[in-house]
Amino acid sequence: MRAMVLERQAPAASRPLGWQELEDPRPADDEVLVRLGACGVCRTDLHLVEGDLPPHRLPVVPGHQAVGRVEAVGAAVRRFRPGDRVGVAWVHRLCLGCEPCIEGRENLCEHPTFTGWDVDGGYAEKIVVPAAFAHPLPAGLGDDAHVAPLLCAGIIGYRALKRSGLRPGSRIGLWGFGASAHLALQIARAWGAEVFVVTRSEAAQQRARRLGAAWAGGPGERPPRPLAHAISFAPAGSVLPEALAALDRGGTLAIAGIHLDRVPELDYEEHLFYEKSICSVTANTRRDARELLALAARLRLETDIETFPLEQANEALARLAADQLGAQAAVLTIG
Ligand SMILES: [Zn+2]
Ligand SMILES: [Zn+2]
């Protein structure tokens, strides 16, 4: 099969991925082999390619928002058959034996492996995935390219909404408006929440308003009303004091990124007193994924994508790095 392979971490602008012919992966007894139709390009891929995240192995095929159809199943797999449509997400395998796993907090597994980081990911024509961690796709979702961003951006946005404690009808602020935030906005609106968006790009502010944001402004601007909930989707810690200052008493800020450049000094009175809370969002449980995919089908969540052929993965990453995407999410089309 053909794949885009990272041999050495380097800036996206230097075109670090190479177009290679690899052996087809073979499914182990508990795995399925999936022929891919699309794979989303996530900011985490960029962090891995550029070295913000340490490599777990090199060379590696990045990509963890992959969509396709099962081509073959391992001897022990009963859950899937060839032809089934599945999604492959960030969590590749969890130990299911550590304390967090046993207690139902499997996103905090002490021995996780991740797609496109510990094992080869979806910037390829085929992928193998444990059957227990492949996500069946409900009927009613769109084509592969439009489904791809749901598998990380969507799931993480959904978990971030839950971590922020969002209650129907309350007010939430979103800092940063990429793929994840624009899906979270749609869910929050469906739950009757009033949504406020802070993002640099005026085009993104307009998209936020079109999707139902009550207000959208730029960095340094404060949403017009105090917020009960906030999510930071930006990899820049500088937004944390802004978001915390915009919270009402008792409000919660969830940080949705896997990478944050730094945590700036906070002022206790302005940013934390009055029982404001700050929390992170780490990966997801399989239940999060199942719930998000069902919601996406029921609410007909819109994913706004720009597509690139697989062999142009470098171009997609460079455009994401330079904030020059023509849409909320980049997706590689395969085959
Ligand atoms: Zn575990
Ligand atoms: Zn991701």
Image (tube, grey):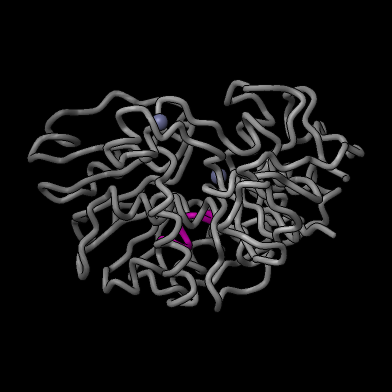
Residue 279, x across and y down, in percent = 28, 37
Residue 322 showing in the rendered view: no
In terms of depth relative to the viewer, which is nearer, 176 or 304? 304
Residue 261, x across and y down, in percent = 47, 27
What residue is drawn where x is 33% and y is 61%?
196
Image vertical order of residue 164 relative to residue 120, above or below: below
What residue is drawn where x is 60% and y is 51%?
77
Q: Is residue 170 left or right of residue 89?
A: left
In terms of depth relative to the viewer, which is nearer, 185 or 293? 293
- The quarter of the picture where the N terminus appears is top right
Residue 156, x across and y down, in percent = 44, 50
What is the total number of numbered labels drawn onto the structure image? 0
Q: Which residue is most to the right? A: 21
In terms of depth relative to the viewer, which is nearer, 18 or 73? 73
In terms of depth relative to the viewer, which is nearer, 169 or 71? 71
Q: Which residue is most to the left? A: 274
What residue is drawn where x is 32% and y is 65%?
195
What's drawn in magenta, residue-wise? Answer: 178-184
Is 182 covered by the magenta stretch? yes
The quarter of the picture where residue 23 lies is top right
What residue is drawn where x is 62% and y is 29%?
118
Image vertical order of residue 167 relative to residue 192, above or below: above
Q: Is residue 316 left or right of residue 289?
A: right
Q: Is residue 195 left or right of residue 179?
A: left
